Image (cartoon, coloured by chain):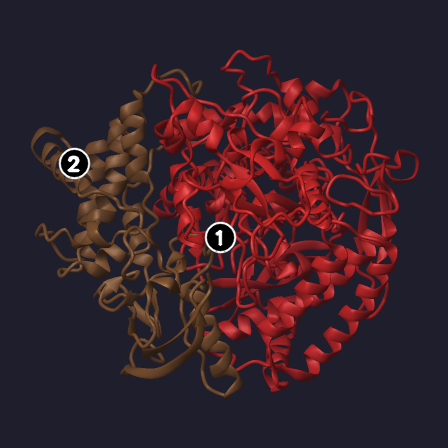
Chain colours: A brown, B red
Amino acid sequence: MTKTINITLKVWRQFGPDVKGRLETYQAKNISTDMSFLEMLDVINEQLTLEGKDPIAFDHDCREGICGMCGSVVNGRAHGPEKGTTLCQLHMRHFSDGDTVVIEPWRSRAFKIIKDLVVDRSAFDQIIQAGGYVSVNAGGAPDGNAVPISQENAEKAMDAAACIGCGACVASCPNASAMLFVSAKVSQLALLPQGKPEAAERALAMVRKMDDLGFGNCTNETECEADCPKEISIVNIARLNREYLKAGFLSSVI
Amino acid sequence: MQLDAKIPGGPLTEKWDRHRFELKLVNPANKRKFNIIVVGTGLAGGSAAATLAELGYDVKNFCIQDSPRRAHSIAAQGGINAAKNYPNDGDSIWRLFYDTVKGGDFRAREANVCRLAQLSTNIIDHCVAQGVPFARDYGGLLANRSFGGAQVSRTFYARGQTGQQLLLGAYSSLSRQIAAGKVTMFPRREMLELVVINGQARGIVVRNLVTGEMERHEAHAVVLCTGGYGNVFFLSTNAMASNVTASYRAYKKGAFFANPCFTQIHPTCIPVHGDYQSKLTLMSESLRNDGRVWVPKTPGDKRPPHQIPEAERDYYLENKYPSFGNLVPRDVASRNAKEQCDMGKGVGETALAVYLDFEDAIKRDGRDVIEKKYGNLFQMYEKITADDPYQTPMMIYPAVHYTMGGLWVDYNLMSTIPGLFVLGEANFSDHGANRLGASALMQGLADGYFVVPYTIGGYISGTTPEDVTTDHPAFKEASQQAEIRTRKLLSVKGKRTVDDFHKELGHIMWEYCGMARNNEGLDKAKTMIRSLREEFWENVLVPGGGKAFNQSLERAGRVADFLEFGELMLTDALARQESCGGHFNEAYQTEENEARRDDENFCHVAAWEWAGDDKAPVFHKEPLVFEHVKLTQRSYK
C-alpha cells in the first residue's frame, strides 16, 4: 500500500566542469513510496523551479532501466542500494522516513562533470569505436542459420551483451577502471563465431584505448560487479584477460 | 498539389527489384563528395548512418542523448518479425505482407508493406553477422515466438531485450564508421529547424544542449529518424526526451504530415498509480504467448485474484476471439480492456486494470521455462509494483506506445520536400492504422539498412544541387528563428512549470483523442488546447538561461510544439469519419463493438499541409489502392 515519507537530500551541485561544486541540502516531503527515485527528483525540481531556483540537472531518458542514461552515486553506491537496479528503477519504498540521502555524480578522471549530476561519458563510445564491432557491411551476410551457435554460448554472449553502458562500474571502482565495460563487449563477440576473426585485434585495441583515456587498472576489487545494474559478471573480465594474453602472445597482431 | 507515391509498376513482388534497377547510381568515387545529415540514432537512424557511410557517403549524425547507443529503440522488448519460416509453420513473405496489411486495418500502402516483408529476412541475416545474440534452440539454430495478429511463429528475439541488442548492433556498425572517419557524430544536439534552399532540404539548425549554442550544418540530403510523438499524451511508454519537434519543424517548412491521429495504445502496460508519475512501462506483448488475460465476471468484485474461483473469471479475449485468443492485435486487446473496465470489472486499487495470469503456464511448463523466456520482464514488473508475478497475476492496462502517423513519404521514403527523407517511426508508411507487434524494429531497420541507401542515391544522382554554405541567408534566418523562439520561452517568466502544462495537455489528449473518440469530444479538446496554448505563452516558467545546459528549456520547446501538434491530431481525427485500427470513433462501430471502416470514403492517407500560424491546415488525399488484398471486416474470432 502507498505511504509517504519525508527525507533529507544532500545533492551535489556544480554549475560547470571547471567550477567548484558543493553539496546542497533539500527537504523532500510527503514522498510516496511508490515513486521512483527520479520521480522524487522531478518533484524536488518542480518545487525549485517554482521557488525561482535552478533545478537539479540529471541525465535520464527511458526510465525503464535499459537506455543507460541515468545514474548517480546514492549514499556511496552507484545507482543506489538495490542490487541489479538502475536509478530510474529504484523506488522510494526502499527508503525510510527520516533518512538522509546523499546524491553525487559519477566520479572518474575519464568522465568530466557537465553540470550537477550530469557527466560526459563519451569515453565509452571511444572504446567501442576502437574495436567493439564486427566488420561487416550491410548486404552480404549469409543466412542467419548458416552457422549454428550452441545455446550455451549464445546465452553467455547475451549475458555479456546486456551491458547498458551506464558507467556504474567505473563509478564504483576504487581505481575508476572500465574493465567490466570493456570485458562485456570483448566477451560477447569472442563467444560468437562472428566475432572470432577480429578477436585478437579487438581485445588489444579496446584495452589500449581504455588506458589512453585515463581509466584505471583492475585490481580485482569486484565492486563493479556488485553495483552493475545489469549484474554483468566479472567472469567476463577473466575472459578479457585470456583474450588479451592470447592476442599478445599468440597472434601476429600488435 | 497532387501527391505522388511513386510506386513502381509491375507485379507487386517484383516492384522493389525493378525499382532498384531503375534507380540511378552514384559512382563510388563520387559518393564521398556528398554530405548526408542523419538526425537520430535509433534503429532507423543508426542503421541508415552506418550504411550510408559504408557506401562511401560523408555522414553527419545527430542525437539528443549523450551517446548514439541510447535512442528509445533500445527499450523495445519482445522481438522482430521476419518471414524466414524457420519453424516450418506455413509462414511466407506473402503471409507477413498480408498479416501486416490486415493488422493495419487496410490503411497502409501495399507496395511498401510488400517490400518490408521481403527485406525482413535480410535484416535477420545482417544482425546475426553483426554478432547480435539472438535466442537459439538447443541445436544452435535461431528460435522464434509468436506475436499478436499472427498465427505463425516468426518473431526473433534476444530475451526481453531485442530492441537493445538490435540497436547495439546498429551502434557497433555506426561506431566502426565513426572510427573510419566516415561519420561525424554530434551527440547532445537537438534539431530545431530544417533549412530549405531552392525547394530542397539542405541542412539543419541544432541546439548544442551542453553550451546552448545554435549550430548550422549543411548537406545534400537530410534524413529524419526522430521517432514518434506519443509523448503528446504526457504519459506514454516513450522515453522522456521523445518528441515531435524535428518532424514538426519539417512540417512547418512544407513536409506534409500524414495520419497524425493514428496512435497505438498498447494493451499490456503497468497501470497508472499516481499524479507524480512520469512515464508508463510496457510489459512486452510476448507475455501474451503464455499469460491469460481475465477479469472477474461480477463487476465490483474486490476479492484478491487467487480467491476468485475459475468459474467466476471471465477470460474475455479467449471467449470472444477463439482463434486468436490472447494474441489478438493490440488495438483490439486495448479496446477490450477498456470495455471491461468501463463495465466496472476492472481490478486493483484504481479499477483501471485487468489481470495477465501466468499460473497455468507455470503449471504446464514449470517456473524455469517461464523464467528463461520472460525473467527480465517479471523482474522489472516486481521492481515497479513490488508484486511477484510468479505468485500473483500481473495487473495491466493500455498505454500510449507508438504512433503510426508521421511525415508523409513516397515509395523512396522521401517527404514532400525534395531531399528530406523520413525513416522509422517518424514516417507514416507501413503500419496503416495499427502496427503489429515486433514490426517496428523490422521497419526501422529495413528503412535504414536496405531502403534509404538505395533511394538516396537515386535522388542525389538525379539532382544537381548548387553549392551552399552555412552563411546562406536561409541558414541565418533559420538559426535566428530558433534563437528568437528560445528567448521567447525564457522571457515569459510566468507561474506554471513546463511539466504542469504538459500534464494538462496529456489529460486532454488521453480523454478526447485516446482509445475512443467522438466528434463532440474532439471539438471540445480543440478549444481546450487552444486556450492552454495561449496560457502557455503567457504563463510558462522556464528557469535559467539559453546559453547553458538547461533541461527545463529543452522540455519547454518540445511542449510548445506538442501544444500545436495536438491540435493537428484532433483535426485529423475529426476529418476521418470512420473507425479503423487505433482510431476508434464511437459513432462508427459494428454490432460487436469492433471498428467499422468506411472504405468508400476513407480508404486514403490523409496528408496535412501547414498553411500558416492560426490557419487551418490544408487537407490532401492519397487514395489507397488494394490490388492484392481483399478489403474485409477484420476478424480475429
> In the image, is residue B78 above or below residue B21?
below
What subunit carries mark 1? B
Residue B474, position in %: x, y?
67, 67
Alpha carbons under labels 1 and 2: distance apart: 36 Å
Mark 1 and mark 2 in contact? Answer it, CB < 8 Å: no
- Residue beneath label 2, please? A239
Residue lying at 73% horizontally and 28% vertically, measured from the top left: B102
Q: Secondary structure at mark 2?
A: helix
Query: Does the rendering let one see residue B263?
Result: no
Q: Mark 1 vs mark 2: give the one in front.
A: 2
Horizontal side of B500 relative to B573 (left or right) equals left
Q: Determine which residue is flagged by label 1.
A: B60
Residue A216 in the image: x percent, y percent? 14, 57
Q: Secondary structure at mark 1?
A: strand
Q: Position of residue B289 (x, y in %)?
A: 53, 29
Q: Chain of mark 2?
A: A
Q: Estimate how packed mark 2 is, as few (under 14), some (14 to 19) or many (20 or more) residues with alpha carbons within 10 Å.
A: some
Residue under the point 79% across and 45% down: B584
Taking the spot 55% from the left edge, 37% from the top edge, the residue there is B285
Q: Is residue B507 above or below residue A177?
A: below
Amino acid type, label 1: Lys
Q: Is residue B410 visible?
A: yes
Residue B524 disc label = none
